[in-house]
């Protein structure tokens, strides 16, 4: 591939950071107390399939959300595998906010807004015509377990996510209440990721960017107890095992190994990156470096010097040291064990995001040119923000969830889209 980089218009990518009706539901055939071994999902099991969750379950992709990404979410695909539709609070095609557009070097979102548009300034489209709230998915980007229990559209004050809450939840309701008001027969709960995700900023401090396990566990216990008291069957989604699983994180040593391509992008990789075992969050660090280096050299200045060193305690440098990673991974292990134990206790299926993020083929070799000019810079399963799944990644999660549900309840939900096409 030729280095066509001096003509690129590059960007600085910002940090990514995820009224209920009381009318009775129509009567439906009841499920037998025990599901027959090896049967497809019985009629009615997924008829009212409701999802509580974060950006993962919402269908957030490429640092934004829009109806076309929502319908690719793993919960929608899981429902389809079981022969059902799941309703969504579909957002019109401008998005809220609009996803990034490939290639990242274009510096724009699908709406035409700049890639680095602030959350406050980003456009937030209305819902598509005909959507009635709450839909069967009440998942919302950025949501924590505390939020699922307590946060309503009125109480969220974030400049972007407050607008998302108003597009997902009826006035005065929380995720939990909006979900249970629909009297689901089956429910998925995917929470806990946002309690640790802010550590990607390079600030990995319990009580600051990480919700301590001792704070989170009682919240999750309270939510799951309420769910289990109202829904007979469901699936709990666990987390990843290792922060390094995210394709957006790369070792400093990987940056060093790609120094020739980065040089062509007007970035000089410092010696500090040689053999460096720090994790660098490249969705922020690399496009920023390229933008600054290109702007500087265009005006006769030097290239940008890229350091892999940690800037120090409490500094937002998008660098995680090995000690930071150990801290994060220790908490992830605690949370995963807790979620799995709760699933077993209440008789729900358990599946983890690690089914996708732990794949050996998830992360391609780091290539800065591909990052800036490719259509799949983070590999075949991850969207343009380096964190969230694309449609293919959601397919992996849906199939994994189907396997877990089959194992728990003795079902035979298909795990292939081919079945959907010909059923």
Image (cartoon, grey):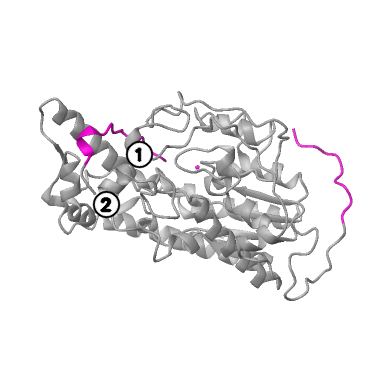
Residue 332 point in image, percent of width and height: 44, 59
Q: Indicate the secondary structure of the residue bearing disc 1.
A: helix
Taking the spot 66% from the left edge, 45% from the top edge, the residue there is 137
Q: Which residue is mark 1?
A: 104
Task: Find the magenta span and give its range.
Answer: 4-28
Which secondary structure class fits the magenta region best? loop
178 sits left or right of 162 in the view: right
Q: Nearer the viewer, residue 231 or 253?
A: 253
Residue 187 point in image, percent of width and height: 69, 55
Circle 1 packing at 10 Å, graded few (<14), some (14-19), many (20+), is many
Q: Indicate the secondary structure of the residue bearing disc 2.
A: loop
Circle 2 packing at 10 Å, graded few (<14), some (14-19), many (20+), is some
Residue 302, quarter of picture: top left
Tell me which label, 2 or 1, sits earlier in the chain.
Answer: 1
Which numbered dot is residue 367? 2
Which numbered dot is residue 247? none
């Amino acid at each position: 591939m030729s280095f066509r980089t001096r003509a690129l218009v590059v960007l600085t990518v910002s940090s990514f950071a995820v009224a209920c009706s009381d009318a009775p539901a129509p009567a439906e055939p009841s499920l037998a107390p025990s599901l027959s071994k090896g049967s497809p999902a019985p009629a009615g099991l997924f008829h009212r399939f409701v999802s509580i969750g974060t950006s993962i379950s919402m269908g957030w992709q490429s640092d934004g959300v829009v109806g076309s990404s929502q319908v690719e979410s793993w919960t929608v695909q899981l429902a389809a595998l079981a022969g059902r539709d799941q309703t969504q609070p579909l957002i019109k095609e401008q998005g809220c906010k609009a996803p990034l557009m490939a290639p990242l070097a274009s510096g724009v979102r699908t709406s035409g807004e700049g890639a680095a548009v602030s959350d406050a300034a980003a456009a937030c489209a209305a819902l598509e015509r005909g959507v009635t709230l709450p839909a069967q998915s009440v998942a919302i980007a950025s949501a924590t377990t505390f939020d699922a229990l307590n946060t309503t559209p009125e109480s969220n004050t974030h400049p972007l996510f407050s607008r998302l809450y108003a597009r997902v939840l009826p006035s005065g309701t929380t995720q939990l209440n909006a979900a249970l008001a629909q009297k689901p027969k089956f429910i998925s709960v995917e929470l806990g990721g946002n309690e640790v995700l802010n550590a990607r900023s390079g600030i990995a401090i319990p009580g600051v960017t990480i919700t301590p396990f001792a704070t989170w566990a009682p919240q999750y216990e309270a939510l799951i107890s309420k769910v289990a008291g109202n829904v007979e069957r469901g699936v709990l989604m666990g987390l990843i095992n290792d922060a390094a699983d995210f394709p957006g994180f790369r070792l400093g040593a990987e940056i060093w190994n790609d120094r020739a391509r980065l040089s062509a992008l007007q970035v000089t990789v410092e010696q500090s990156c040689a053999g460096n075992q720090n994790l660098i969050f490249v969705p922020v660090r690399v496009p920023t470096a390229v933008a600054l280096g290109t702007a500087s050299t265009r005006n006769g200045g030097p290239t940008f010097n890229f350091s892999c060193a940690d800037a120090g305690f409490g500094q937002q440098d998008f660098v995680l040291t090995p000690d930071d990673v150990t801290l994060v991974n220790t908490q992830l292990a605690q949370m995963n064990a807790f979620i799995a134990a709760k699933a077993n206790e209440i008789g729900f299926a358990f599946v983890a995001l690690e089914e996708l993020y732990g794949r050996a083929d998830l992360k391609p070799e780091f290539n800065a040119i591909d990052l800036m000019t490719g259509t799949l810079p983070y590999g075949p399963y991850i969207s343009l923000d380096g964190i969230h799944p694309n449609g293919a990644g959601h397919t992996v999660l849906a199939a994994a969830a189907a396997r877990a549900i089959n194992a728990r309840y003795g079902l035979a939900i298909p795990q292939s889209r081919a079945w959907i096409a010909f059923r």
